[in-house]
Image (cartoon, rainbow, N blue to C red):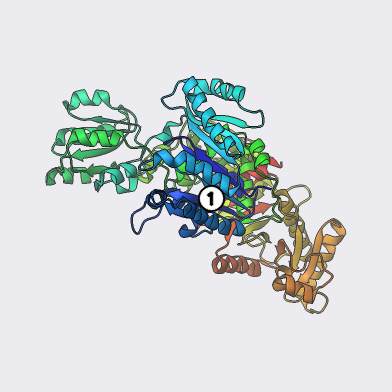
Amino acid sequence: MNKAIYIATSEHNSGKSIITLGLMSMLIGKTAKVGYFRPIIEDFEHGKIDNHIETVISHFKLDIAFEDAYAITKSKLIKKKNKGKLGEVLDLIIEKYKRLEEQCDFVLVEGTSFSGEGTVIELDMNVLIAKNLGIPTIIVGTGIDKTLEELIDGLHLTYNSYKQKEVEVLAIIVNKVIDQNIKEVTAGLKAILPTEVIVNAIPLIPSLDNPTVKEIVDVLDAKILFGEAYLNNEVGHFSVGAMQLHNYLLHLHENALVITPGDRADLILGVLQANESANYPTISGIVLTGNIVPEESIIKLIEGLTSIVPILAVEGGTYGITNKIGNIKSQIYADNTLKIETSINTFDKYIDTENLATKLSAFEAEGMTPKMFQYNLVKRARKHRKHIVLPEGNDDRILIAASRLMAMDVVDISIIGNKKQIESKLIELAITLDFSKVAIINPIESSKYDEYAATYYELRKNKNVTIAMARDLMEDVSYFGTMMVYKGDADGMVSGAAHTTQHTILPALQFIKTKPNSSVVSSVFFMCLEDRVSVFGDCAINPNPTAEQLAEIAISSADSSMAFGIEPKVAMLSYSSGASGKGDEVDKVRKATQIVREKRPDLKIEGPIQYDAAVDKMIGLSKMPNSEVAGQASVLIFPDLNTGNNTYKAVQRETGALAIGPMLQGLNKPVNDLSRGCTVDDIINTVVITAIQAQGL
């Protein structure tokens, strides 16, 4: 049974990172602990680390030290080879790989990148490493600057190189193929390869191939004069500003990088003005050559502009700098989240992941680890896409989360707010939203405003609500967003980043109402601990539930647990375990447990039980040796809000656990509340679970 896969390329700039990121995302959802290993890496400066390793470890939060994720640098490899000590290199690679393999359920091994000194030996080295590690391979090629015949012949030759050394090739992936040629490329390769080899092709994705301003800064060792916050701007085109301004403006392209001597104040100010104008394309940045910085009066003028792009000063003439920029090959780096998520989404879209997963391994991890849980959330949300409304378009975190969600391609989104204000915010935040895919809705200007107000009036007129009151309430973003869900114009709503829980939930209670079999709205948090995911309820809504309400909360929480792939073993928490405790509170928990057993005999439930006995196997065994739940509880039900809220926060802060939620239970349609201290990741996770809730309706 294979515990690893080797990603190999046949040449430089093949786009191997897309495959690495996509595979890592896929593997994390299927195995408890995934490792990442690069046998040979490029030399790196003292105090820095390899970009590939940094990107993968930081984005996927792998518990791997940098030193354990590689074996040797390329320069040291070449020295060893020249001294005839290649065997020592292989010994080191195998030793470090095996050490990592022992710690992980699966290891993704990434081969070399074919750049710089030593390129001529890399193909042989990759074959030799894969052979000696005894793991199968995925070969990645590129369609750039090749005829169909050259592409197929080259990949066939690479395939044969591995097969001759008895290295199993599971798949060949051709990257950067012109879209209309994908079928021809895959058909050509399938015709000459064994049927068991998976063949897929990925089109050229400009946003992944284009460098960012940050990469240009690094290559040119540029000084950043302005716009440091926008270094992730994508450079889709570059040109030299040598002509008169009125002529140069005609040559501007979207996401253009302007290269011009630092004393061309007219051109600098002109393109900055064009960037603000709706009549000209957006520029990504300006590079000032000749080590010339604009005069103080021009600097002062730029400082007063409402929007800015990165402006860089570099040494060297315009011609030489332009050539250097033209030779930059874009990479994906750790803080460019948008490129990482685009890469993962591209992989999922164009690669036969189900077939590949079957071929990779038949690993089935016991239980549900946090990374598996989060991976599966995104997969499930994407499978049956839903439409989520975000009513707080004036909050920066909401806009950043919306941008990332669109890059993940996981849900459809509507944002409630003022479009002009949102556009201004997006510029400030240096993020983009495709308004052809994300609807921006101002309630008072919406074509649905009158209809929604009339609907609310009809629903609430017996509560002394007038049509005028209904119209006023429909201007409120929470009421408007909830009405979108009620009317079926959205599948779910996520709010609370800038509003109280009451403000978020009250409209839902008024007209979405509870499910027929529910008398109480409750909540759960998915607590992603180091080695498991637990469900905590109710930690957000009900201050002091009765025994009947507590039983309903337990049943709802168990159902939520099952719906999200976690086997429910329900612990009804109290200050005593079993029959020993006395008092009103423990009696309430005991009664609630009995009600659950009567209503749902299919559920594994224990109560009353103390927290330590519920989650610690040794303590659970000693206190309740015959229990199916003690020591292994996955659903923990707290007796009151005071206990639940404080416990989830204590666990979150003291253990570093990720708390996803609260997710509301019992409503006819999903509306979920955020904490006003929520992070962007909290918003994304809550949107995803809301989409999954909507799938179950």
Residue behind mark 1? 683
213 or 306: nearer the viewer? 213
| In the displayed structure image, the side of residue 433 where residue 488 appears, left or right | right
Up the image or down, 622 lies above or below 163; here it is below
Image location of residue 418, percent across then percent down: 43, 39
48 or 79: nearer the viewer? 79
In this view, which residue lies farthest toward the front? 84
Query: What's the residue at 43%, 50% (across, down)?
Result: 84
Image location of residue 121, percent across then percent down: 43, 41
Up the image or down, 295 lies above or below 630; here it is above
Check disc 1 and report its element: helix, strand or loop: helix
| In the displayed structure image, the side of residue 427 where residue 197 appears, left or right | right
> From this viewpoint, is residue 2 visible?
yes
Image location of residue 298, percent across then percent down: 15, 42
> From this viewpoint, is residue 460 visible?
no
Looking at the rendering, which quadrant does residue 331 occupy? top left
Query: What's the residue at 55%, 45% (across, down)?
Result: 130
20 or 465: nearer the viewer? 20
Image location of residue 694, percent across then percent down: 66, 42
Amino acid carrying label 1: it is: Ile
Query: What's the residue at 41%, 38% (across, down)?
Result: 120
Query: What's the residue at 20%, 30% (across, down)?
Result: 241
